[in-house]
Amino acid sequence: MTGFDLKKPEHDIHHIRGDILSLPDLVKACAGMDAVVHIAAAPNISSAPPDRIVQVNVLGTWNVLQAADLAGVRRVVLCSSDSTVGNTVWREYFWMPEYLPIDEDHPVRPTDPYGLSKQLGEEVGRSFAARGRMEVVALRPVFILFPEMLPEVIARNIDPVNYRGPAAGGPVAAGGGLCWHYIDPRDAAEGFRCALDYRYRGFESFFLAANSTLAPEPTLQRIKDFFGKLPKIKDPDWFEDNPFAPMFHTSRSRDILGLNIRYDHRQRVLSST
């Protein structure tokens, strides 16, 4: 295993220092690799100016795939985002889904620079997969909830209107989205491992999310309160079995990838509020 980053890793692994905006750096890193996991990015809508987000996430993904293709890499796993759908981060960009739960066939129309950059990254992956030499899978994790973020998540649940904590406007503020979706980083990491192991050809995408949201209200109620009505419910059992299920249908990641979600922080967060 070889790491590739601008910074030296904390763990003792073989490492190449480089920039995803440098194709020569990536060509060097991809040489001799069987697979590449691409997770380098501007990580959210508030992480950089809009033009920088698009540059890093779109050109960077192109460079990774181009370098991998030149090196004969057979499989690339891309870290995409639920933001490709276009209604998961800032309120001014929300639009009502065409149906619920949202699956991988649902139309995507992001209007913010981050969501757009992730959609374009997926299209780059689809283009390279269409050449027939490479397998590309795009994973769409929701907000990845690291342990150090839990106190802020709890504080926001206690007073979501007036909270003005250290990350106001930052990644935690953005990550909750309409229904406060999240995934534990250990489950997210397992999703990437599964994407390296399962058999497929061409291009695939998968949503990754915990089995329940962190919102105090049931998912359908929260969406109805926001939009004033509900869209078509494509799979009623999804919410009848679990009223707090994510608005993203994660059955494909379970049934095809083989991802078994193990960590649920709903009770921990809500019991603190």
Image (cartoon, rainbow, N blue to C red):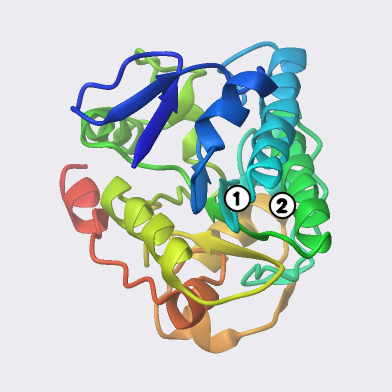
Q: Which residue is at 50% across, 80% downward?
A: 256
Q: Residue furthest bottom?
A: 237
Q: Which residue is mark 1?
A: 82
Q: Position of residue 109 (x, y in %)?
A: 83, 48
Q: Position of residue 266 (x, y in %)?
A: 27, 56
Number of marks in the image?
Answer: 2
Q: Position of residue 194 (x, y in %)?
A: 40, 66
Q: Which residue is at 21% across, 21% downward?
A: 10
11 versus 203 height, above or below: above
Q: Residue furthest front?
A: 32
Q: Is residue 81 visible?
A: yes
Image quadrant containing the C terminus: top left
- Nearer to the camera, 167 or 22: 22
Judge left or right: residue 209 versus residue 229: left
89 versus 133 height, above or below: above
- Nearer to the camera, 117 or 137: 137
Image quadrant containing the N terminus: top left
Q: Quadrant of residue 136?
A: bottom right
Judge left or right: residue 267 versus residue 132: left
Q: Which residue is mark 2?
A: 85
Judge left or right: residue 132 versus residue 136: right
Q: Which residue is at 44% across, 21% downward?
A: 5
8 versus 215 height, above or below: above
For the residues bearing labels 1 and 2, Cβ distance under 8 angstroms = yes
